Image (cartoon, helix red, strand yellow):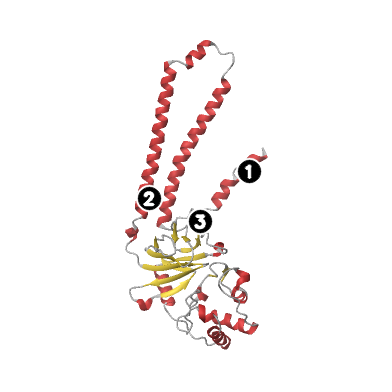
């Protein structure tokens, strides 16, 4: 009976996967909770029918085993009696009624869930508007406000306020991507030439992981998005920092890194608010030192990771659009020192 001891393992594995910063069982957002409630209803209804069908099959099997080749004629007559026929008809009607009722229950649950998902204003008017653009293979985020002077860009990381509705407009510059933060909401595609939108209403503060959920090329698996749900006070502080331009470094090595950054290819692709760097085809680096990861979740944002990424971006993430710069050791250390001041 050694095999019997292995039966609970799939259940334990499934339960172990129902927690963390990226899980389909998450309920940290209004939409995610609605979707998971609907999934629970489907599991209960279909589970009951599965149990009923399996019970019928087992009963039929054991009944068949009870048939004997030496049955008496009166036993066959009993099986063909009107009473037996009426029982079969009653059972059939009950089964059809149960199936119809089950399908109606699923349809009604789906309808009300769909209506709830389509009403973002339940959490009030969206207080944050973000234009999120998918690229191969990173996320460009543009925060928009009524006062355009307060707009700013960031990359591969979003901060949104707890308990408020955040409107995200989804665009793509190249191929079809898909925005998916399972802890907070369902999926929504980013289609070139078309604008989609999704509303996030987080109900629990924390750090969550989003992912491109539509195969988009070689580095599809390395196109992650950090989502940080802040309390209103923390969000206000983060917002104030992001709206500030980068400061000129005082450290001599970091100052040398600033010169290298501005005079080499870096400033042609990347932008840093408050400096001559105004490139628009690569991630905005104004506050890169405050982010949790590098290269869309490929590396943790550490000193060693910065060195590795700048020295050999193709070795870390083959196929991405960042070229080999060819910095010598002193230049590399200086550029890293400068980027670490961008908090």
Q: Which residue is mark 1?
A: 6
Q: Residue at x 50, y 11 (%)?
A: 74
Q: Is residue 171 left or right of residue 300?
A: left
Q: Which numbered disc, 2 or 3, marks the residue closer to the eye?
A: 2
Spatial separation of the CA atoms under disc 2 and disc 1: 37 Å
Element type where label 1 sits in the image: helix
Residue at the spot of label 2: 113
Q: Position of residue 218 (x, y in %)?
A: 57, 63
Query: In this view of the protein, can residue 115 be seen by the observer?
Result: yes
Q: Residue tagged by mark 3?
A: 23
Front residue of 11/113: it is: 113
- The tag earlier along the polypeptide, 1 or 3, is 1
Q: Which mark is residue 228?
A: none
Circle 1 residues within 10 Å: few <14, some 14–19, many ≥20? few
Q: CA distance from mark 1 to mark 3?
A: 24 Å
Foreground: disc 1 or disc 3? 3
Residue 250 placement (x, y as % from top left) = 53, 88
Q: Residue at x 41, y 70 (%)?
A: 235
Determine whether 248 is above or below 96 in the image.
below
Q: Is residue 37 left or right of residue 146?
A: right
Quarter where residue 202 is shown: bottom left
Q: Examine the rendered structure and indicate whether residue 282 appears above or below residue 221.
A: below
Is residue 112 toward the left or the right of residue 60 in the image? left
- In the rendered structure, are the residues bearing label 2 and label 1 in contact, judged by CB atoms less than 8 Å apart? no
Task: Please report contact status of discs 1 and 3: CB closer than 8 Å, yes or no.
Answer: no
First in sequence: mark 2 vs mark 1:
1
Q: Residue at x 47, y 58 (%)?
A: 183
Could you say which quadrant of the image residue 254 lies in?
bottom right
Q: Residue 225 at what x, y percent from top left?
A: 50, 65
Query: The residue tagged with tag 3: helix, strand or loop?
Result: loop
Quarter containing the N terminus:
top right
């Amino acid at each position: 009976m050694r095999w019997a001891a292995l039966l609970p393992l799939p259940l334990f594995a499934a339960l172990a996967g129902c927690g963390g910063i990226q899980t389909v069982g998450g309920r940290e957002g209004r939409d995610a909770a609605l979707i998971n409630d609907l999934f629970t209803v489907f599991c209960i209804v279909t589970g009951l029918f599965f149990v009923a069908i399996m019970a019928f099959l087992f009963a039929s099997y054991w009944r068949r085993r009870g048939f004997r080749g030496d049955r008496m004629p009166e036993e066959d007559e009993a099986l063909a009696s009107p009473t037996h026929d009426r029982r079969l008809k009653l059972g059939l009607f009950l089964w059809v009624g149960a199936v119809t009722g089950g399908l109606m229950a699923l349809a009604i649950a789906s309808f009300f869930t769909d209506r709830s998902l389509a009403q973002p204003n339940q959490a009030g008017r969206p207080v944050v508007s973000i234009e999120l653009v998918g690229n191969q293979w990173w996320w460009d985020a543009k925060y928009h406000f009524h006062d355009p002077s307060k707009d700013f860009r960031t990359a591969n990381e979003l901060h949104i306020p707890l308990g408020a509705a955040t409107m995200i407009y989804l665009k793509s510059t190249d191929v079809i991507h898909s925005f998916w933060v399972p802890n907070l909401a369902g999926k929504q595609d980013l289609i070139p030439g078309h604008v989609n939108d999704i509303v996030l209403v987080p109900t629990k503060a924390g750090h969550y992981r989003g992912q491109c959920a539509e195969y988009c090329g070689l580095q599809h698996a390395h196109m992650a998005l950090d989502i940080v749900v802040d309390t209103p006070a923390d969000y206000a502080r983060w917002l104030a920092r992001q709206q500030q331009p980068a400061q000129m470094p005082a450290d001599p090595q970091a100052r040398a890194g600033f010169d290298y950054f501005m005079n080499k290819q870096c400033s042609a692709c990347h932008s840093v608010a408050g400096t001559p760097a105004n490139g628009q085809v690569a991630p905005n680096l104004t506050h890169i030192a405050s982010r949790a990861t590098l290269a869309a979740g490929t590396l943790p944002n550490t000193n060693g990771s910065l060195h590795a990424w700048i020295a050999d971006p193709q070795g870390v993430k083959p196929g991405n659009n960042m070229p080999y710069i060819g910095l010598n050791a002193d230049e590399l250390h200086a550029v890293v020192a400068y980027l670490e001041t961008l908090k």
